[in-house]
Image (tube, helix red, strand yellow):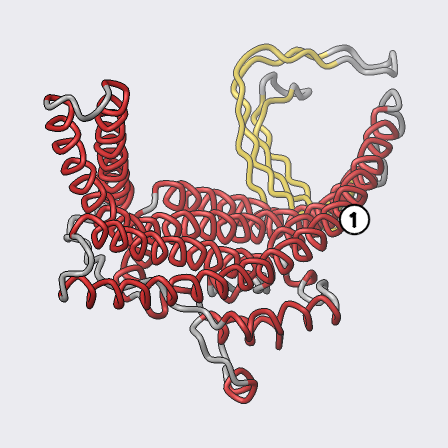
Amino acid sequence: MFAQRFITVLLFGIGSTSAALAQTSPSYPEALLPELTQILDQARERAPALVAQAIAQQEATARLDAAKAAYYPRVDFGGNFGLTQSSYLDGNYPDEQTTGVAFNARVTRPIYHWGAIEAKIRQASLDFTNESLQRVFILRQIKRGLRADYLTLLLNQTSLEILRLRRQITADNATRTASDRQQGALSTMASEQAEINLAQDVLNLEQVDSDQTRIVADFKRNLGWDAPLRLDVPPPRPDAAALIAWAEQTRAQGLDAWLADHAEVKRRENLIERERAELIRIKSTQRPLLNFTASIGQGQRNTSAANNVSTLSTFIGIDATWNIFDGFETSARKRESQLRQRRLERQLEAYRAELRAQAVNVVAQIGFLARQYQLDERRAALAEQTFSIQKREMDEGRVSAPVFRQQQVAVQESRLAELRVRVRLLLALNDYLDLTLPAAVDAQLDYSK
């Protein structure tokens, strides 16, 4: 848990250990991006996949209610009309035939079914919990996609500025190249290369602009987001040095303390528990099942005085049913359930190992990205210094405008490279948080049912 709290502090550039220790709740990048927070809140309510999952949870609730209904008395009513033939096994009594209408009502309630009813209720409860855990999984997938798209929008804003500047520079070069070619001072190949460069810059600009349009359209279609997006806020700036130290410490301490609270691990454990309950239900089918029964019926009987005399019969007591032999169906179902439980247990063991490996890889990636981020920050700072020098020299007339504009592009590209690594680092931190934070932290759900 300390590692989870510490990493969220690092996410927003708080480098001191004392500040990390003071952090009490995990946070994601949207903590410093209010507009992204609003988008994610709207996704929780309107995302189609979550709406469908909410319906699945309602289905699970209905199944749970249906399972609990076994505790209530069952009332059945029936009737018939026709000919009834009664034959006595003792030959001293003649057979009887009656014609008329018969009605009967029956009330039954289970007394003891060897835990089968409780097992069915347990299965329905586990299904409900698993639907809730699946909602957490879907929600985190949606949020990760939205975070990536939103950060891409911020990156693209910078890319558009650079591409527009580059296009202008390339267009100026193409104009000069065309003029030089007309004067015979430049070859046809050089002129064609300038035209290709300009066409490529235009294409790159259109692609980035199209990407912006697509993301905004996705927000509108999937979330109903109609408000104009403010993209003037840069992505949060991580503390690279602190992240590098955290990655080394985390690898040394181990990366599996969070596995017990992982949503998918819980869901798979519930599937194993559900199969155990299924085995209880299967075994109960070949044991005596006891029920309380009360019935009342109206019919006709022949008597010595008259035929088709109306009768009223009542019964109250206990009945028992016992399946002695069913063609080995139950034994086959038991074997199937036991094998399925073993398969689920092996799959869970393999999944836990896979999660550990993912955590190791994500932490290693965070360390590499943090180091790369440090280098890109230094590279961008040097580019800024060079740009400042050349700007001063251009003001003094010692550097031409084209050379200055090329340096201006270099500065912007350095900044863009730093932002790209920053976003990759933020998404890697997001992956770690999604992997290690308990499901209830994100969804605020109650798993006690």
**Camera-nearest residue between 188 and 291:** 188
Which residue: 54% across, 19% down?
Answer: 80
Which x, y percent locates residue 283? 83, 40
Label 1 environment density (alpha carbons within 10 Å; few <14, some 14–19, many ≥20): few
Which residue: 28% across, 20% down?
Answer: 189
- Reply above or below: 293 against 298: below
Which residue: 63% across, 35% down?
Answer: 313
437 left or right of 218 in image: right
Which x, y percent locates residue 391? 20, 64
Quadrant occupied by the C terminus: bottom right
Which x, y percent locates residue 348? 75, 47
Q: Residue furthest bottom?
A: 18
Residue wearing tag 1: 349
Q: Amino acid at mark 1?
A: Glu
- Reply above or below: 443 against 127: below
**Camera-nearest residue between 18 and 200:** 200
